[in-house]
Amino acid sequence: MATLRTTTIGSLYRFREDLLESIDEAIAFQSSLGMDIISDGEQRTDMVSYFAESLSGLSVSNGVPFIADKVELKGDASDFSKVKDLAYIRSKHPDMDVKVAITGPTTLGMTCGSRSAGSHYGGLRDFTLYEDIADALAPIAESLADLGAHVQIDEPFLSQGYGDIKERVALLDRIADGLPVERTSVHVCGYVGRYGVLSHLMRLENVSVVSLGFAGRQERPNMDVLGDARFSDNGKLLGAGCIAVTPMSENEVGDAESVCALLESTARAVGPDSIAYAHPDCGLRVTGKSLVAIILRNLRAGVDLFGRG
Ligand SMILES: [Zn+2]
């Protein structure tokens, strides 16, 4: 069995004041800790503000995002911050395996619309809001893929469950339509065993990797529903979250043995050939700064331990 690859979900703490120096350091940091697929590190801002600050119809006031009008892509996708940052990374590392995350329509719409859904939409239940967001995100995803990146759609809110979960998951296929399926993934954190979330994710046509967490308290029960999802039959690979991102101190960080044990359990549930890569349960933006390197080091050591069987 080939050694499993490693990656992060995407976000890291901000390394430096200067943006480009900060991106450089985020890349070097991940490489030095043995990550195989490198993220942009989300050095500008958080997963909602990237889009709330840049998409037409979304806005931010006093740090709180809101919906002001119909959501649309402003200008050209190549002007979008994440695409520009990827182009910068590409200019320095033309052959690096890079992954860039975009925030999915349900998470973005629910977060921005919680204060005000604006007058264009009939409130948070108006599904055209999420369709508009998906249509604004699609050209961004395409630009990222054209630059050779793996594209990950982050939809943490899906695990909360919705009556129209089927339609909400289908929006991910709408964004991913035409992208290289082998480089397209979706990340959902929390427990996905309720409301049919996982089984709907399995039916996605344009997404090959479904990334889930298994280490955190909320995520642990995902292991019990993993086998029923039939990853292999559905042509899906698992992104295996195998170390928690919320330790309060160094002795709470999962060790290599626990990472390895979780990988062994996921491999039993989905089959050893159905794991795309190992990663922390979620992003590391708000994780204690001093613990982030320890988490990634233990992740790497656990994957190496798993590889030695
Ligand atoms: Zn997450």
Image (cartoon, helix red, strand yellow):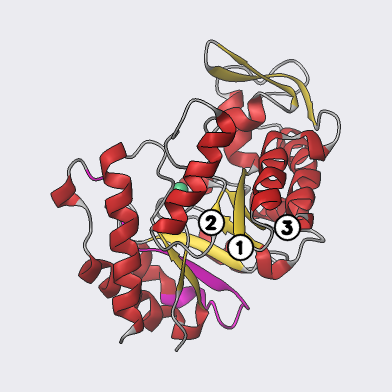
Q: Residues within 10 Å of mark 3 (few under 14, many from 20)?
A: some
Residue 174 in picture, x, y percent from top left: 77, 53
Task: Residue at 61%, 61% (x, y): give it.
Answer: 96
For the N terminus, the image quarter is bottom left
Query: What are the residue bounds of the magenta stretch?
Result: 227-247
Disc 2 + disc 1, Cβ < 8 Å = yes
Q: Element type at marker 2?
A: strand
Question: Disc 1 to disc 3, how far (Cα)?
Answer: 23 Å
Residues 60 and 114: in front is: 60
Judging by the rendered image, the residue that carries numbered circle 2 is 38
The location of residue 308, given as percent across then percent down, is 31, 85
Residue drawn 30% across the image and 54% down it: 295
Q: Which residue is mark 3?
A: 173
Q: Categorize mark 1 by other alpha carbons within 10 Å: few (<14), some (14-19), many (20+).
A: some
Report the Cα–Cα distance between label 2 and label 1: 6 Å
Find residue 210 and report its horizontal and vertical position in percent: 55, 64
Q: Farthest right residue?
A: 75
Q: Amino acid at mark 3?
A: Asp
In which image quadrant can residue 264 be found?
bottom left
Q: Residue furthest top?
A: 62
Amino acid identity at mark 2? Ile
